[in-house]
Amino acid sequence: MTDKDALARLAEAGDVSAMLDMAFAADAAGRQADAAHWMDRAAGAGDAKVRLQAALWQLYGSNYTRDEAAAFCAIETLGRDAREPQARRLTAVMLAFGMGCRRDWSAAIDLMTQASDAGDALAKTDLAMLSGGNSVEISDPASWQAPPPETLLTRPRVDIYRSVIPPEWCRHIIDQARPHLAQAHVKDARTGQRTVDPMRTNSVTLIELWDYGLVHYAVAARLATACRTAIEKLEPPKILRYQPGQTYKAHFDFIDPDVPAFARELREKGQRTKTPLVYLNDAYAGGDTRFLSADMSFRGQIGDLLVLRNTRAGGKPDRDSLHAGLPPTQGEKWVYSTRVRTRPQIARLWREF
């Protein structure tokens, strides 16, 4: 009997771990009906973390019909009745975004407060960051006003917003990202898929929605305000680390409409019109952001926001936006990177980046 047969026997006998393994194996193989079948059986056994995974599949539209409202109800129930910490935090984030529910910042803060009072260390840290350590009402990030920008370049258009993100938030994001770093990828123009390429040698952490806290939401809200866009049009954030010698060579951030392999992405997710980039630290040498057509380099201070426009009026890609992340010569460079799209980036798209 093969290991696969043994796993199937355990699953059929009601072993929850085996059922979950069967669900993930079917998911990886693209067998959606089988994946949903085994996830339903595993979730039916009552384990809170398995039920949360099933709700996340529903939120993303993975193997189930996508239904944000139903996913919110399931996740909110787990946070309230099963007191699952991750579910409670995720419910708060969904309330902040208005994802599957009516947006309610006060309710999001109340949930995080309950989680913190119950001993959830991440919730406690989140609240401390948002309040600045003071027991005062935490203002809604949607009401934040962006400072006036400095125009660094007019072609390509590059604006700098100073001190947009508090230093303690920046350090918090780095601490969260560091354990999950992996090799960064680029998009292959032949296949449209992500691939490792020598042109990009830095590492990256993708902050998934279920790992979000309200600090991450507040950062996204500030970036959306500065970029004058809806928060739903921001891509999932990537936290980038450059060690000495690591680089991202000259590249564009727009999706090239002349490349057939990118046609589906452009149709479904929209064009990348702007690149917001937050400098999370400044204790390094070198590591400038280089704009090749303008023959200019820039290096921000901790908390500064750089916004590069990738397209011209009318949406045509701006090939003057060619830029590079130069290698640090000493220390680590950390940046928070996202892009503004022309279409909303619904929850199910997050797992595809």
Image: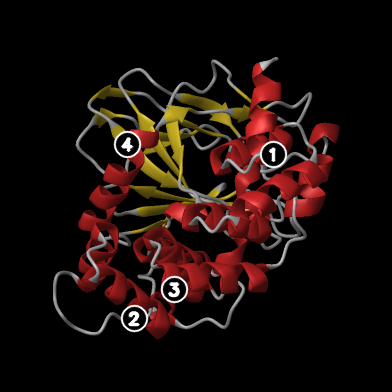
Residue that carries the numbered disc 4 in the rendered image: 178
Residue that carries the numbered disc 3 in the rendered image: 81
For badge 2, the amino acid type reads Asp
Name the secondary structure under disc 3.
helix
Up/down of 146 relative to 55, above or below? below
Please tell me whether mark 2 or mark 4 is closer to you in this view. Answer: 2
Name the secondary structure under disc 2.
helix
Place of residue 186 in the rendered image (x, y in percent of width and height, measured from the top left):
60, 29
Specify whether 287 is left or right of 206.
left
Residue at x 56% of width, y 51% of height: 339
For badge 1, the amino acid type reads Glu
Residue at x 56% of width, y 44% of height: 16
Cα separation, mark 1 vs mark 4, equals: 39 Å
Q: Residues within 10 Å of mark 4 (few under 14, many from 20)?
A: some
Please tell me whether mark 1 or mark 4 is closer to you in this view. Answer: 1
Which is nearer the N-term, disc 2 or disc 4? 2
The disc at residue 110 is 2
Which is nearer the N-term, disc 2 or disc 3? 3
For badge 3, the amino acid type reads Asp
Cα separation, mark 3 vs mark 1, equals: 29 Å
